[in-house]
Image (spheres, helix red, strand yellow):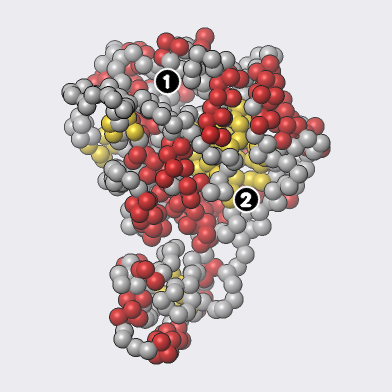
Amino acid sequence: SKATVSVLNCYDIHMMKTSLLSLLALAGAANAAAPTCASIGKADFCTQFACESTCRGFPPGFGTAGCVDATNCANPPSWAASSVCSCSSAPPGPSPTPAPRPTEGGVVGGYLLLKNIGQLQALAANSETIPFTRVYLAFLSPTLQYVAGSKTLKNTGLDDFEFEAMQKAVGALTKGGVEVFLSMGGWNAGCNPYFYARYSVGGYGTHTPNYWEIEQYGGGDLNNCVESNQFCYVCEPPSENTTLASFDMFPTPAGHATWEQAKAYVQGKSPSPAPAWNEDMVPGGKYTDSKTGVTVTLPGRPLAAGRNPYQDFVQLAKELGVSGIDLDYEEMWHADYFKVEAPMKGQKPATGDYKGPWKLPQTVYKYAAIAKDLQLNIAAIAPGMKLGTASAAVGAWGGSWWGGNLKGLWFELKQTFPEVLEGMDLNVMTYDLSSNEEFHECPDKDHCPLADQVGFFMDTYTKAGLGNAFVGYEIGQPAYPSPVHDKQNQMPLTKTALSTIMSQTQAKFPAGGFLWEIYKAAVDPSQATPQDVAQAICNSVRPGDKRCTGTIPQLY
């Protein structure tokens, strides 16, 4: 920061050939020479970014989150220079106190797709009795920008909401014993229309589950899928009235301190192939597909210079007073575009048009870096804040990957980067499943009905050692397969299926369950309502809790 004064840095200390006593004396002198962070209007350096450097000998405040430890002294990062001021010996100010996680049972979670503040306020007004112990507020943009202390939700994905009203509702829910999480991402935030069309929907030939979209809107030719038809409406159908501005992407904020730290962590543990961060794929910028020569505008909001949306996300979460944040990463296009060949044992080397299977290492690396970046910022800004994630139904299923989804992503994370999953609750999206065997959409011939598929996929999480997995339930009409093109193979959650899942699967996962979405309606009387599901989860993971008889307030 230009407002701060440069003092003795790690490199200076490292290079000095002095005795230990002299070194300590120099460090003390430097500390005395530095202005206090508060005196130059940078008190947040102490409360948000304070850290102890083992080679400085005194606690500095940095203008950018991240600490320099002994291993960095020989080559200090550029952001450490001219950005130091002194902090008092008093500890950093406290983060908002999270809602206590109930000790008598598991989590009963529900996603609230924010459409109006009235829904959130109704839940807050009934916080002591609703049949939830955790509410996820969806969705914040992965390209959000939030300036500390600004108290505005503009440029966050929740642009139409007022900060103070949101903060007040969060406080009421927390006081009533309900944890509140902010959720970043979601389907539209992970669907990059051009790349998803060409490399996911249309990347595996013409006989695939969603190729009908290319046929219907592009005459069967991928080259006819262009910006004017949202690259053949593969992310959302025309009926949703989306525009290309409705979509987003998870950025790689090159040069930002915690992102660079996260990259270093991943690079230090990654096997072959090495990470390729593709930092030229900038939200809102132009990008030329090297495989086709086509230049497109990438989705998302351009980031202001020096901003890191993952840091801003944590800062916003702290100021709103939530208990945790949720990473909902669904960039299937990324996996399909950056996949690498992975021939099976005994399979002949590829010659010409390779047909699979593949691996998705670059997507594993990207997810790991994003999660690590969030963790670094939680540690610096809001210690004690929780981090959870949504995960694909097939996400813990190891073995061959044939493309088109995120199969095995969390399995691979557990194998290579287990630290990023430590303490994370995993909301397994065991819904939007299909019974269409023309495309081998059942996991095997013995697990095709909804309840059987849910049990199969949750079992893969257990086998992968991902114990803190929550069973997922979707209310009403599933988003997949298409209700227009393949409704006969949809598997909505009926009351009968709910009962079976509860007895066969949820009982094995006492950590919790969650539903999508709190105010989504059942289509017909045979289907389970949000209240049916919440009460059933509650009775399974929190037997005897008075919340289990609670109701969801209705808005008329």
Q: Residue 344, position in %: x, y?
A: 32, 27
Q: Residue 391, position in %: x, y?
A: 51, 35
The quadrant of the image that shows the N terminus is bottom left
Report the residue at 62% width, 50% height from top.
323
Q: In this view, does 190 lie above or below 371?
A: above
Q: Which three-letter amino acid code belongs to the residue tagged 1?
A: Pro
Closer to the chain start, of discs 1 and 2, is 1
Q: Dot 1 corresponds to which residue?
A: 238
Q: Dot 2 corresponds to which residue?
A: 323
Q: Distance between the residues labelled 1 and 2?
A: 37 Å
Report the residue at 40% width, 49% height from top.
369
Res 207 seen here: yes
The quadrant holding residue 334 is top left
Q: Which of 140 and 23 is in front in this view?
A: 23
Mark 1 Cα-neighbour bin, 10 Å: few <14, some 14–19, many ≥20: some
Q: Residue 353, position in %: x, y?
A: 21, 22
